[in-house]
Amino acid sequence: MRVGVLALQGAFREHLIMLRSLGVDSCPVTRAEHVSDVDAVILPGGESTAMVRIASGTDLFARLRERMDGGLPVFGTCAGLILMADRLSDDSLGGFERLGGLDITVARNAYGRQRDSFTAPVDVSGLADPFNATFIRAPQILDVGFDTEVLACHNDRPVLVRQGNLWGGSFHPELAQDPRVHAEFLQRLGATV
Ligand code: GLN
């Protein structure tokens, strides 16, 4: 199994390091042709406005969306979640192509500004002990569709969701020095980690 990490901007190195620590073959994804080579993709946190600008005018998102629709497992974290949301509460990314696919509504930056960043223990379905989740200018999941399963909440709001092959989280699982969320995603794909 080979996991690609979208590497246009943001915390992609931390995801690559986490995957390597789990013994999983991984590679950066920056172009449409890289998408053909991978069995799953992680979309990192960072700045979604930068990511959509960098990807615009390329086939990268169209190719990724095509493979998502064909069942490719994709996990979007923070800005990555914003890229995957079917609906945003404002049009701050207006005009730029995103991925969509995950039947949720997301409000960008709804947990506050950079200085309001925080970590909080969250109970994640399938994990025996709470996961210390890091929220950085995080998007808030306002609603989830019928087929979207909520895997973790913070203050009664979903912060980790799954819809078939698609996973989305509003926090940064790669910053926790704790590979359990990555391992859950990978194990449900059949990887032995
Ligand atoms: N606020 C960022 C955005 O809107 C996301 C923050 C993050 O990924 N840590 O893209």
Image (cartoon, rainbow, N blue to C red):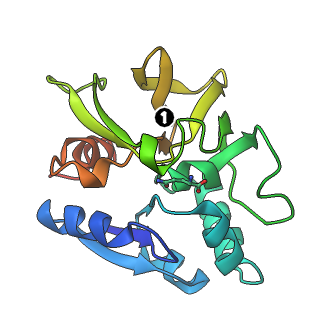
Q: Callout 1: 10 Å neighbours few (<14), some, many (20+)? A: many
Q: Quadrant location of residue 151?
A: top left
The picture places residue 47, in percent across and down from the top left corner, at 56, 63
Q: Can residue 1 be seen in this view?
A: no
| Residue positioned 22% across, 46% down in the render | 183
| Residue positioned 78% across, 54% down in the render | 92
Q: What residue would you read off at disc 1?
A: 162
| Residue positioned 60% across, 81% down in the render | 32
Q: Quadrant location of residue 54?
A: bottom right
Q: Is mark 1 within 8 Å of ligand 1?
A: no
The picture places residue 177, in percent across and down from the top left corner, at 15, 52
* Kind of residue indicated by mark 1: Arg
Q: In this view, does 192 lie to the left or right of 86?
A: left
Q: Farthest top residue?
A: 156
Image quarter where the N terminus lies is bottom left
Q: Using the image, determine if residue 102 lies above or below residue 66.
A: above
**Most foreground residue, 11 or 62:** 11
